[in-house]
Image: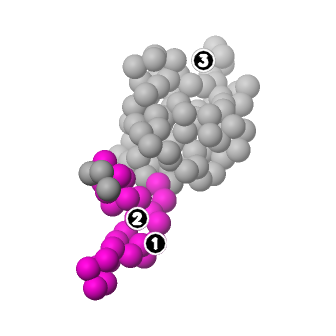
Amino acid sequence: MKWSAILFLLTCFSLRAEQGKAIPIEQRESIATVAGEVARPGPVKLVGKMGLYAAILSAGGPTTNGSLRRVTVTRKGREKVYDLTDDGQKVIQAKPGDTITVAKKNFLGR
């Protein structure tokens, strides 16, 4: 077995050893919550190194009232606001446990 395959298995499963064999106990799921002005608010499964924008699209994308200019990420009790109309910020990695909130557009439609 190649090392890359072994590393993949270690990151996807919690393992325990029994008589020299690795036996999967449970599969870890990477889940973030997408809230606010999105089509389907709620938990989304993070796949690979999914970015914030991709996580929002997994929740059905922003509604017509949703503003990608003000997306708040709450991570470990801290909030940070991102402008996802900036391509550099679209790819910021979403992490398990994040709450990603799409704000409502303001009176200027932004």
Instruction: Give the vertical position of 85 relative to 54 (above or below).
Output: above
**Cα–Cα gap, marks 2 and 1:** 6 Å
Q: Does the residue at mark 3 contact the one at mark 1 (Cβ under 8 Å)?
A: no
Label 2 sits on residue: 13
- In the drawing, what numbered circle is on residue 26? 1
Horizontal relation, residue 31 to residue 88: left or right: right
Q: Where is residue 6 in the image (x, y as percent from the top left)?
A: 31, 56
Graded by Cα atoms within 10 Å as few (under 14), some (14 to 19) or many (20 or more), the crowding at tag 3 reads: few
Label 3 sits on residue: 110
Graded by Cα atoms within 10 Å as few (under 14), some (14 to 19) or many (20 or more), the crowding at tag 1 reads: few
- Considering depth in this image, is 101 or 104 the residue closer to the camera? 101
Q: Position of residue 70 (x, y in %)?
A: 51, 27
Q: Label 2 is placed on what type of residue? A: Phe
Q: Label 1 is placed on what type of residue? A: Glu
- Considering depth in this image, is 103 or 55 the residue closer to the camera? 55
Snapshot quadrant of residue 56: top right
Q: Does the residue at mark 2 contact the one at mark 1 (Cβ under 8 Å)?
A: yes
Question: Which residue is pictured at 35% across the width and 46% down the height?
Answer: 78
Q: Does the residue at mark 2 contact the one at mark 3 (Cβ under 8 Å)?
A: no
- In the drawing, what numbered circle is on residue 108? none
For the record, the magenta segment spans: 4-30
Question: Which residue is pictured at 50% across the width and 54% down the height?
Answer: 31
Horizontal relation, residue 18 to residue 65: left or right: left
Choose the circle earlier in sequence order: 2 or 1. 2
